[in-house]
């Protein structure tokens, strides 16, 4: 199953470079929350974070050919995001662009950038997820944590836990299912 | 391996080339799988954050809010390219995943015109605005004597050639190319505004400073080069 790649996203990145729209959508889906969370931590503004996250992925789309794999893909994306945030470059015209502002149509307001009343995720919910993970059965928790926190490959986890790769894959999947079930208000079935 | 487990492995980059292509095809066609992928992304993001360092955003007791949040991942992502491509937004709902938005995204990404637009227009525009913000000499490079006395602005002969009128002040630059602009666009950077105003002769005026939009338009239209 495992491809011989150095970076977990290499295969998808190569597909994006070859024009694979599905691969780009998947990478965008995969990293959107992390980019947003990073930018929110920096800007403390939901609107700024949304604008900057969008700009970040525009840049990713534009510059994907220049990604050489010298760092993890997220590191590369993060660098783009933080450079944009440092400039505090906020396109206040983005919403207006969608309706094509005319130079004759000057009846618009500059959006304000208040701190959000709500956000993608709040402290209490994150703490609940972290707490829930601690309650997972040891086998699921170990595989999931080695993967999500330590960034280990399935093969590495297989060696560390002395477990077949197929079992590692299944345990990580079951851990994720349990967490989704938990955050969606289901019972605390640990699979 | 069922398709959800396959998406989990795809998320971890643990599928072969053939399996990856197959999983992406399944993902493309299945909204439920897209939501699962977004869920995995949110869990991943949550696990990267040290809960001892989290900033409380809003005290919230109702766990149902997670569902909204989980949904937002996809819709926000979908909105990115739609924003880039300046497609019609009227039918796009940010609060729900709908097939129309996905279709629009798909069409948008596939389109040669879209890639061309991004490459030639948005890329130039983003780079131009970043230059305005970051390069102190960028706004001085017009190399022309510009007279704005007819709209009440006097020039200060400082290094940045700042124009002033009361509390209003700005620097100015003229592009001979139109940067793909057809309409006025503007950005906010800290307490300053950046206006790009396309003129009838195919040039674009960049105004960076403390002026309102109407003043920016007035300035651009009254430039005597």
Image (cartoon, coloured by chain):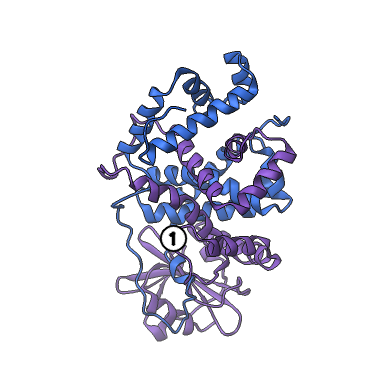
Q: Residue at x 30, y 37 (%)?
A: A124
Foreground residue among B125 and B42: B42
- Left or right, A23 with respect to B59, comes to right
| Above or below, comparing residue A95 to residue A75 in the picture | below
Q: Residue at x 39, y 48 (%)?
A: B67
Foreground residue among A108 and B142: A108
Q: Position of residue B8 (x, y in %)?
A: 57, 36
| Above or below, comparing residue B51 to residue A65 in the picture | above
Quarter holding the N terminus of chain B is top right
The secondary structure type at the circle numbered 1 is: loop
Q: Residue at x 35, y 65 (%)?
A: A111
Q: Position of residue B80 (x, y in %)?
A: 53, 58
Residue A68 in view (yes/no): no
| Above or below, comparing residue B214 to residue B186 in the picture | below
Residue, disc 1: B94
Where residue B138 sits, quadrant-wise, is bottom right
Q: Residue at x 63, y 35 (%)?
A: B13
- Left or right, B15 with respect to A107, comes to right
Mark 1 neighbour class, 10 Å CA radius: few under 14, some 14 to 19, many 20 or more? some
Chain A visual colour: blue
Foreground residue among B211 and B181: B181
Q: Position of residue B114 (x, y in %)?
A: 65, 65
Foreground residue among B196 and B210: B196
**Number of on-image labels:** 1
Chain B visual colour: purple
Residue A62 in view (yes/no): yes
Q: Chain of mark 1?
A: B
Q: Position of residue B203 (x, y in %)?
A: 59, 78
């Amino acid at each position: 199953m495992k491809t011989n790649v150095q970076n977990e996203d290499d295969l998808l990145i190569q597909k994006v470079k070859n024009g694979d729209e599905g691969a780009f959508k998947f990478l965008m889906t995969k990293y959107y929350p992390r980019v947003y969370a990073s930018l929110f931590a920096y800007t403390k503004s939901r609107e700024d974070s949304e604008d900057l996250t969008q700009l970040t992925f525009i840049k990713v789309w534009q510059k994907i050919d220049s990604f050489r794999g010298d760092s993890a893909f997220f590191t590369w994306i993060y660098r783009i995001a933080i450079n944009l945030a440092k400039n505090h470059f906020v396109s206040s015209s983005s919403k207006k662009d969608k309706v094509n502002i005319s130079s004759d149509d000057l009846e618009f307001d500059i959006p304000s950038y208040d701190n959000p009343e709500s956000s993608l995720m709040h402290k209490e919910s994150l703490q609940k997820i972290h707490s829930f993970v601690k309650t997972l059965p040891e086998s699921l928790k170990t595989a999931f944590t080695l993967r999500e926190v330590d960034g280990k490959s399935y093969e590495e986890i297989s060696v560390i836990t002395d477990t077949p790769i197929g079992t590692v894959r299944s345990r990580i999947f079951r851990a994720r299912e349990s967490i989704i079930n938990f955050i969606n208000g289901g019972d605390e079935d640990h699979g | 391996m069922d398709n959800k487990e396959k998406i989990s492995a795809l998320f971890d980059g643990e599928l072969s080339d053939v399996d990856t292509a197959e999983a992406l095809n399944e993902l493309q066609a299945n909204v439920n799988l897209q939501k699962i992928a977004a869920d995995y992304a949110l869990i991943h993001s949550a696990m990267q954050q040290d809960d001892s360092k989290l900033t409380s955003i809003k005290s919230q007791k109702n766990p149902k809010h997670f569902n909204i949040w989980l949904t937002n991942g996809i819709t926000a992502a979908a909105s990115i390219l739609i924003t880039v491509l300046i497609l019609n937004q009227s039918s796009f709902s940010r609060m729900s995943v709908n097939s129309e938005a996905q279709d629009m995204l798909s069409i948008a990404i596939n389109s040669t015109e879209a890639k061309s637009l991004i490459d030639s227009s948005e890329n130039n525009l983003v780079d131009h605005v970043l230059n305005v913000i970051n390069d102190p000499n960028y706004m001085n490079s017009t190399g022309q004597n510009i007279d704005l006395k007819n709209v009440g602005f006097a020039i200060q002969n400082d290094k940045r050639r700042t124009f002033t009128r009361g509390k209003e002040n700005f620097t100015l630059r003229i592009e001979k190319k139109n940067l793909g602009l057809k309409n006025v666009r503007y950005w906010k950077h800290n307490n300053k505004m950046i206006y790009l105003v396309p003129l009838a002769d195919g040039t674009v005026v960049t105004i960076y400073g403390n002026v309102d939009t109407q003043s920016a338009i007035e300035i651009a239209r009254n430039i005597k080069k």
